[in-house]
Amino acid sequence: MEQTLGPERAAVIDPAAIRHNVRTIASYVHPAKVMAAVKAEGYGHGAVTAAHAALEGGADWLGTAHVSEALALRAAGIQAPILAWLHTRATSFADAIAEHIDLGVSGWEIHPVAEAAESLQRPARVHLKIDTGLGRNGCTIEDWPELLRTAAEYQERGLISIEGIFTHLAVADEPDRRETDEQLDLYRRALEVAQEHRIVPDLRHVANTPAALSRPDAHFDMVRVGVGVYGQSPFADRTTEDLGLRPAMELRTTVANVKRVPAGQGVSYGLTHRLDQPTALALVPMGYADGIPRVAVHAPVWIRGRRYQSVGRVAMDQFVVDLAELDTEVSVGDEVVIFGGDSGIEAAEWGAAAGTNNYEIITRIGERVPRLVVDSELTPLPGTGSAGDAQLPGQGPR
């Protein structure tokens, strides 16, 4: 019998899970403040939805990569402190300053930021970034004294206010790697050099989600957490459940077709998979245009209370699932959960099937997939209850 409830496909977003995750992380890093990263449309969950939920869960700050993302939050009426840190020559620093958005500064930006502040007759709030080993944004330790001198001069002229000094960690998701210790040592050295230039900001921030959950020595005054806010584990050997977090996204659709096929049947483009026995195949109406990785191999789905695997290449709009038997009970219209919800399937499993990680899986879900916001504390999803009290990492059910 066909099941025609809800949209054809949806990413169901649970703000209660985001609130729970922020409370959990905040309880672990206290007294450090929490900045919730809501860049990339809130890691695919919807930036405004994620921002509101994170703030309700106790986040002190919001973080975006681009100023344009921060301006969109302001336009939505969100007045919490926001930091934006990735800029180009086209970045509107004046708009950011006018909207009280803090700006990450790695080097060249210091001059156009100061010019914009002078034109507005309003100081820009900046956070100086030191590259301690990631090799992306951030000032090198060799150029750090010059950046500090320039920043101090602009601060003395009333054009900027130095609010923070920060860096970003490269391998905190692999807790045994010595590079994190090396990065923290270099960061502390950078703070000492800043103090020599009489720059002692209120906010020192380093830790991302994995460091927030595994490196108390990296907490400083604030942590910047991203994937953990959305209930995803940053560790290869610890699940979301292990960390006491709750996934905030369930990706679901319905079966578009079911048919019986003989042994030897090829599946999808390139015929990279052939069936070794007669079986039934189900067609799932989502593909790489929706964010399903084209390269995913034998990825899991949940239909009628059972796990099944995808077979063959993912196409633009669809992929195929082997139902593993001829006389299947699966029928057109049955719900398919790709990950999340009560399925027990984590985004990380799709990441493993595609040779990537859960970060990419949740952020790549396309615009053709509507975000359906269902707050489980107000309207519980089938089979779920309301969110409980926050738990410290490692204290959740296993």
Image: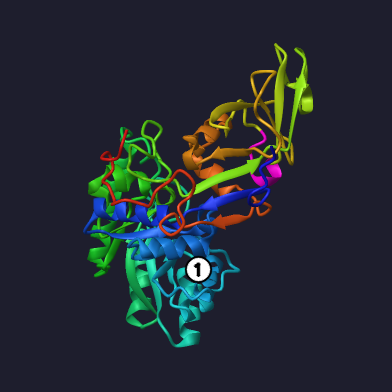
* Structure colour scheme: rainbow
- Image coordinates of residue 206 in percent, x first then y, are 33, 53
Image quadrant for the C terminus? top left
Q: Which residue lies most toward the front here?
A: 1
Q: Secondary structure at mark 1?
A: helix
Q: Quadrant of residue 82?
A: bottom left
Q: Quadrant of residue 350?
A: top right
Between 335 and 13, the residue placed more toward the observer is 335
Image point (55%, 49%), residue name: 363
Q: Callout 1: few (<14), some (14-19), or many (20+) C-alpha neighbours within 10 Å?
A: many
Image quadrant for the N terminus? top right
- Image coordinates of residue 58 in percent, x first then y, are 32, 62
Q: Read off the magenta span.
A: 287-294
Tell me if residue 183 comes above or below residue 345 in the rendering. below
Left or right? Give the position of 58 relative to 338.
left
Tell me if residue 138 comes above or below residue 345 in the rendering. below
Tell me if residue 276 comes above or below residue 366 in the rendering. above
Q: Which residue lies most toward the bottom here?
A: 121
Image point (39%, 71%), residue name: 81
Between 71 and 11, the residue placed more toward the observer is 11
Tell me if residue 59 comes above or below residue 5 in the rendering. below
- Residue indicated by mark 1: 70
Residue 288 belongs to magenta span: yes
Q: Quadrant of residue 378?
A: bottom left
Residue 27 belongs to magenta span: no
The reply to whether residue 105 is visible in this rendering is no
Dot 1 amino acid type: Ala
Predominant secondary structure in magenta?
loop
- Image coordinates of residue 10 in percent, x first then y, are 61, 50
- Image coordinates of residue 376 in percent, x first then y, are 44, 54
The reply to whether residue 152 is visible in this rendering is yes
